[in-house]
Image (cartoon, rainbow, N blue to C red):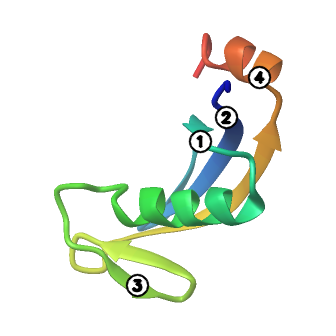
Amino acid sequence: MEKKSGYMFLVLHERNGEYEYYHKSLHELPNARKTTMKKYAENYLEGFYWTSKATREDGGYYFHGGEVYVEIDSYRRISEMDYNVLRRFL
């Protein structure tokens, strides 16, 4: 039996002082369930700055002693074809 995969396009929003950034990424997941996507996005967010301890607050995480705030902007399921095209550019 062939393994079913899901593909997700994830956008994180970062506030760093007066600056704001959007980080876009692609992920292949073990399945296409919404709960799997949400859990994966949360885990990815918590470890976004892997060198700094994260503090959960205000629906996102504060890093570097509260100087940087990152939250999930959006995530959505995408097709395998879209994943294969987008991964060439992201």
Determine crowd level at label 1: few under 14, some 14-19, many 20+ residues with C-alpha closer than 10 A.
some
54 lies left or right of 30: left
Residue position marked by numbered label 2 in the rendering: 5
On screen, 87 above or below 17?
above
User: Is the residue under label 1 in contact with that under label 2 (CB below 8 Å)?
Assistant: yes
Residue position marked by numbered label 4 in the rendering: 80
Determine crowd level at label 3: few under 14, some 14-19, many 20+ residues with C-alpha closer than 10 A.
some
- Nearest to the eye among marks 3 and 1: give it: 1
Going from the N terminus, do you reach mark 4 or mark 1 first? 1
Residue position marked by numbered label 1 in the rendering: 29
57 lies left or right of 73: left
Going from the N terminus, do you reach mark 2 or mark 1 first? 2
Residue position marked by numbered label 3 in the rendering: 56
Q: CA distance from mark 4 to mark 1?
A: 11 Å
Q: CA distance from mark 2 to mark 4?
A: 9 Å
On screen, 61 above or below 35?
below
Q: CA distance from mark 3 to mark 1?
A: 24 Å
Residue 49 screen position, x and y as percent: 29, 56
Residue 53 screen position, x and y as percent: 20, 72
Residue at image coords 54%, 89%? 58
- Nearest to the eye among marks 2 and 4: give it: 2
User: Is the residue under label 1 in contact with that under label 3 (CB below 8 Å)?
Assistant: no
Determine crowd level at label 4: few under 14, some 14-19, many 20+ residues with C-alpha closer than 10 A.
some
Going from the N terminus, do you reach mark 2 or mark 4 first? 2
Residue 32 screen position, x and y as percent: 74, 47
- Element class at badge 3: strand
What kind of residue is marked 3?
Answer: Arg
User: Which residue ends up furthest to the front in the rendered image?
Assistant: 1
